[in-house]
Image (cartoon, rainbow, N blue to C red):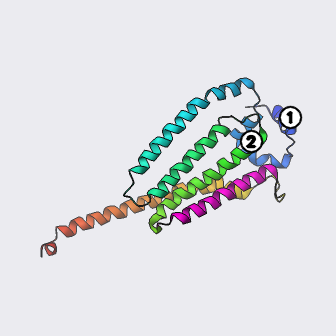
């Protein structure tokens, strides 16, 4: 962890006002540490890890696509593949943000961090919608997911670059979309998935009972 004096000098070097730092400092400290890290040895170490990261992404992609092909006869296979692809996209972006590939470029770090936040919000939205795929509307999922990802990305860029000039270094919307919403979506997904499984088990149990009833032999 850097000293407050050194961090203050580096913030002044990037010409960021005081009001714009608080949200990024408290919410995305790991991204800020990468932006402020100008150590050449650290960059060299991160560069050596690119090959292993790429191999991991390729292996993960293969495994996820293989798992999704096993759902060929299941409802919601397209939505599940979309969820897997969004997760892979997050991993690729984290290779640049957390991996520190663009550690020397503040603009590149802002864009990749904003895209990562948008992808995270999109991922949890798709996760939640997968419970409601009985509507079988892939177009609805694609449209709403693109809207959430685009909106979250814009909010992150606006917070970093002050595009609209309508906030004071704080973004409650970005906080909700990247922290509150993912946590709520994960909990709601678990509850709804458990409810769905219990209902299916009860249905199968009822069918089994009816097949052995005296009336079924008539």
Tag 1 residue: 9
Residue 208 placement, left or right of 177: left
Residue 80: percent from left, percent from top: 47, 54
Is residue 190 visible in the rendered image? The answer is no
Q: Main secondary structure of the magenta part?
A: helix
Disc 1 crowd rating (10 Å Cα; few below 14, some 14-19, many 20+) is few
Residue 119 placement, left or right of 10: left
Q: Earlier in the sequence, mark 1 or mark 2?
A: 1
Q: Which mark is residue 108?
A: 2
- Asked if 18 appears above or below 139 in the picture, the reply is above
Residue 96: percent from left, percent from top: 66, 38
Disc 2 crowd rating (10 Å Cα; few below 14, some 14-19, many 20+) is some
Residue 218 placement, left or right of 55: left
Image quadrant in which you'd find residue 181? bottom right
- Marks 1/2: CA distance? 21 Å
Quadrant into which the C terminus falls = bottom left
Discs 1/2, front: 2
* Magenta residues, start to end: 136-162
- Confirm or deny contact between disc 1 and disc 2 (CB under 8 A): no
């Amino acid at each position: 962890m850097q000293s407050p004096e050194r961090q203050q000098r580096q913030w002044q070097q990037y010409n960021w006002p005081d009001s714009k730092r608080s949200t990024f400092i408290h919410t995305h400290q790991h991204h800020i540490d990468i932006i402020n890290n100008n150590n050449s040895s650290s960059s060299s170490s991160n560069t050596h890890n690119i090959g292993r990261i790429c191999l991991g992404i390729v292996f993960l992609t293969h495994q996820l696509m293989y798992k999704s092909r096993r759902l060929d006869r299941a409802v919601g296979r397209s939505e599940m593949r979309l969820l897997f692809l969004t997760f892979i996209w997050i991993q690729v972006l984290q290779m640049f943000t957390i991996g520190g590939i663009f550690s020397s470029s503040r603009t590149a770090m802002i864009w990749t961090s904003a895209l990562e936040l948008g992808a995270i919000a999109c991922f949890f939205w798709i996760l939640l919608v997968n419970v409601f795929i009985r509507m079988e509307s892939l177009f609805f999922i694609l449209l709403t997911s693109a809207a959430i990802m685009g909106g979250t990305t814009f909010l992150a860029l606006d917070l970093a670059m002050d595009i609209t000039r309508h906030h004071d270094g704080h973004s409650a919307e970005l906080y909700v979309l990247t922290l509150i919403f993912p946590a709520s979506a994960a909990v709601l997904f678990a509850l709804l998935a458990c409810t769905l499984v219990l209902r299916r088990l009860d249905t199968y149990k009822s069918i089994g009972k009816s097949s052995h009833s005296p009336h079924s032999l008539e």
